[in-house]
Amino acid sequence: MKTIAKMQKKLSMLLGRRLPTVRRCRPQPLDEEQSVASSLLKKLDMIGSQLVQDILSGVHQQAGGLTTATIMGRALIDESNEYISRGADPKQIRVGLMAAVDEVIRQLNAMARPIHVPSMQLLRVAITSAQGDRAIGGLIYQAIKRAGLEGDISIKTTNTADVELRFSYMDADAAEPAPSRICHLDRWVTIPAVDTLLSQVYAVVFLVGGSSEADKHQKKKLITDAVMRTRAAVEGGLVPGGGTALIRCMKPLDSLMVDNKDQRLGVRAVRRALRMPCWTIAQNCNIDGSQVARVMEEYRMCEDLGFDVVSGRCCSMSVQGIMDPTKVVRSAVTNAAGMASLLITDHEFVSESDN
């Protein structure tokens, strides 16, 4: 449990510093989340560290959500352990917890708004995913516009000072791929007509140059993470950001049917954990997190209405562009539940002795 507590405390500091939205507040880099978590896990107890590592190992590959997963996981564990200390059955709590998570996932899927390809919304998502770099975000937009969700996008370093986007396509009736075409950071090629795009399969390659090897590595990592985030947004759509979508999932849990009171405690633990990302963001911005979460719950009838910590007022999250990829939010919820359900039901572990 100490492993989760220490990692949650460290990672939660990232959430308010760079809000993970598709607006002016940039998402924290995936490698920053990963490096913070990895450095902590190396220092903490081996058994707890390995459990956490096993549960969260897939989060990075699912376009992020590690910070939110850890914050919610800590809340679920603390709440569940409180119930267990009063005599509740941990296995029944787990059943209720997983039932609640299934309902949350259903609510998130119903709430999701699709991103059309191409669209200005996709361009905004790409730019924000690229840490606000409009040039690189523009190239990512071009790449995903051509490759879509299934097409191949590879990222390679090159001995130049620039970043280029090279793509080739195969006509359905052609035996050989068409010649490569290049987009540079400072100029984009003419976009083919939609019917032409539908008849072609694109292979896209980012050629990443830089002033040094370190510069190339940093750019390559930025592009890799940004492509992953943008594709996640296209694949699952967007939900209101800043923790708003999770708060909107709280009310449906009140009517969720379970078999006994201990399962109801598991549902209650999930309901309370859903408040924590919004609470943490507000607290890290020197705003009373409890008050923000309470206001958000009062406005639950309007799923798009959320609290903008930058302006300090409630607003339409979609109008302001404060949106999160649904896939990332789902990943955070499911991984938090997996981590909590394991740690509250497994109390005995086997480890190798140093002797």
Image (tube, helix red, strand yellow):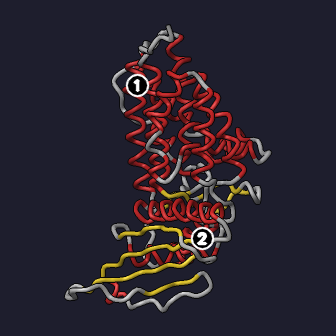
Judged from the image, the secondary structure of the residue bearing numbered disc 1 is helix
Is residue 15 positioned above or below 311 on the image? above
The span from disc 2 to disc 1 (Cα, nearest Å) is 40 Å
The location of residue 83, given as percent across then percent down, is 52, 17
Is residue 254 positioned above or below 352 on the image? below
In the image, what residue type sits under mark 2?
Answer: Ile
Residue corresponding to mark 2: 127
Q: Nearer the viewer, residue 106 or 28?
A: 28
Please, which residue is most extreme toward the front here? 159
Is residue 344 positioned above or below 153 on the image? above
Please give left or right for residue 345 compared with residue 124 in the image: left
Q: Earlier in the sequence, mark 2 or mark 1?
A: 1
Q: Nearer the viewer, residue 112 or 164?
A: 164
Q: In this view of the protein, can residue 317 be seen by the observer?
A: no
The location of residue 46, given as percent across then percent down, is 53, 23
Residue that appears at 51% across and 29% down: 269
Q: Residues within 10 Å of mark 2 (few under 14, many from 20)?
A: many
Please, which residue is most extreme toward the right here? 286
Is residue 67 positioned above or below 174 on the image? above
Q: Nearer the viewer, residue 187 or 154?
A: 154
Residue that appears at 50% across and 78% down: 165
Please give left or right for residue 75 compared with residue 232 in the image: right
Residue corresponding to mark 1: 94
Q: Quadrant of the N terminus?
A: top right
Tell which tag, 2 or 1, sits nearer the viewer. 2
In the image, what residue type sits under mark 1?
Answer: Arg
The location of residue 212, given as percent across then percent down, is 66, 66
Residue that appears at 80% across and 45% down: 286
Q: Residues within 10 Å of mark 1 (few under 14, many from 20)?
A: many
